[in-house]
Amino acid sequence: MSPDESRIESNPSMSSDDESPNGVENELSNSMESSMQPRLLVHPENSIAYVTVSDPVQVNEGIAGRKFTMYRVNYDPPPPPADGSSSSDAILSYATSVNRRYSDFSWLYERLHKERPGAIVPPLPDKQSVSRFSEVFIEGRRFHLEIFLRRVVCNPELKDTDCLLVFLGGGDDEFKKAKKDGSFGSDKANVEAANEVAADEPYQPFDPEMAPGAHYNSQHDYNKLIDKVEGELSTKKAGIKKWIKERKTSLKGTMVRSPDDAIFDEITNYISALEMGLKRIDTQTSSLIRRDKDVSTCMLEFGLGCDALCHIDDEINGVIGEGDDTTSSTGIGQTFRQMGKTADEISKLSYEYYEKELSCFREPLRDHLKMIHAVKIALQKRHNRRVTYSTCINAVESKKASVHKYKITPGKEGKSVDAAASLARAEATLIVAKQNYEECSQRALREVDRFRRENASYMYATMLEFAK
């Protein structure tokens, strides 16, 4: 192996990715290409001991052979408190070990939003359509899925959710049933999740051909299919009406006011300013990291050029030898050799500093921006509940006016009975909407307060780690 080849092999900054114009950007976009893991913090840190995601295995599904990656999720309950108290952070009283794929984690993410609107649900790793089965990508996804799950376990608003319990401890059949129809947990949780679906999901026409049991074999199966189709259409129709009413409420600006509105306005301004400042820092950090990577590459190229000149001088002077023991009769070749060694050391130091910036500062910074986005989603959930509550208030007022109109209009007294029944249903819906709105608001306040406390310690730890 020539000195030039050994130098390239010893310095990862001259990888084949750098031959493309976007080589640096590609490396910046995926922290796992670095030899160092991103330093992402989890609170509290003792959760690391009992929630793990490991052993990624590729699996072929069905006749078509669709490939996906399965991960082993292990849960070991933490030891009881040393003081002998009965309080414990254990989610389950026994150890579990289950297999889960990325879509299962995605289901958990969506379900957490539905069960606990207003809570800050930590972000999932992004999807990727290419190179999904490379070792680097799989290990990076495993690492971030583990961080996601630990953060969920550490969150006091999320740790006791039914979906998390079935995710960690449910068998294959139980978990598939939960994913299919959501038939687990308390009735209240299922009702709230159904309301969340109607409020947040866009309308999609029902396709009977895609329904389970569409290929019926008897009249009984046919009747069941018809009942299911009618139920689906009725649900979708109700969802459309609810969406239209809530859109009207938002556009008219007739929103209910509460004493907490000023606090939430302050929170919204704080989150927006924090996001803007961190994005600005992220832009400059990317430029600094790119500069350090370019310095490493340029110094390596400079060292290779010095080595080439050294060999030319040795050939002219008839010097035979390799490495540091080679001496040049004129001294010029030896000078180029020392310059090449120095350039090579500078290149290695620059690349090490580049890796440190990537793993200790830029990736935690990006992770913090994702957490800010999670806070914004939690605030949006509270806003959705506020819109629903305001819509229910407007509906009750409208129905009260209708009942009064029918009562005082000759010949329409009979309609007042139906209008009164409709008013009673609207008032019952209003009570539920008010309760959901107040619960979501209080949960969002607790979560933002926790985020503010952890935000200061998180950024301090990130800066301290980067300064070391």
Image (spheres, rainbow, N blue to C red):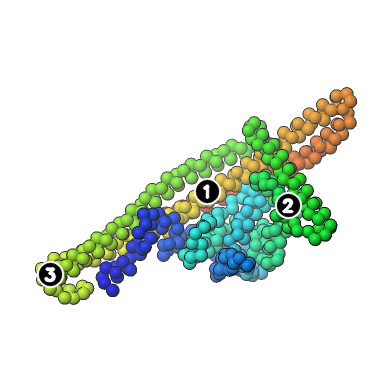
Mark 1 — residue? 372
Residue kind at label 3, given as amino acid type: Ile
The front one of 402 and 147 is: 402
Q: CA distance from mark 1 to mark 3?
A: 64 Å
Above or below for 435 versus 24: above
Closer to the chain start, of discs 2 and 1, is 2
- In the rendered structure, are the residues bearing label 1 and label 3 in contact, judged by CB atoms less than 8 Å apart? no
The local crowd at label 1, few if under 14, some if 14 to 19, many if 20 or more residues have their Cα within 10 Å, is many
Q: CA distance from mark 3 to mark 2?
A: 84 Å
Residue kind at label 1, given as amino acid type: Ile
Q: CA distance from mark 2 to mark 1?
A: 41 Å
Residue kind at label 2, given as amino acid type: Pro
Image-quadrant location for residue 318: bottom left
Kindly tell me whether residue 185 is visible in this rendering.
Answer: no
The mark total stands at 3
Does dot 2 land on a helix, a strand or a loop? helix
Mark 3 — residue? 316
> At x 72% / y 37%, what residue is drawn?
392
> At x 56% / y 69%, what residue is drawn?
57
Q: Position of residue 452 (x, y in %)?
A: 53, 48
Mark 2 — residue? 208
- 48 left or right of 416 in image: left
The local crowd at label 3, few if under 14, some if 14 to 19, many if 20 or more residues have their Cα within 10 Å, is few
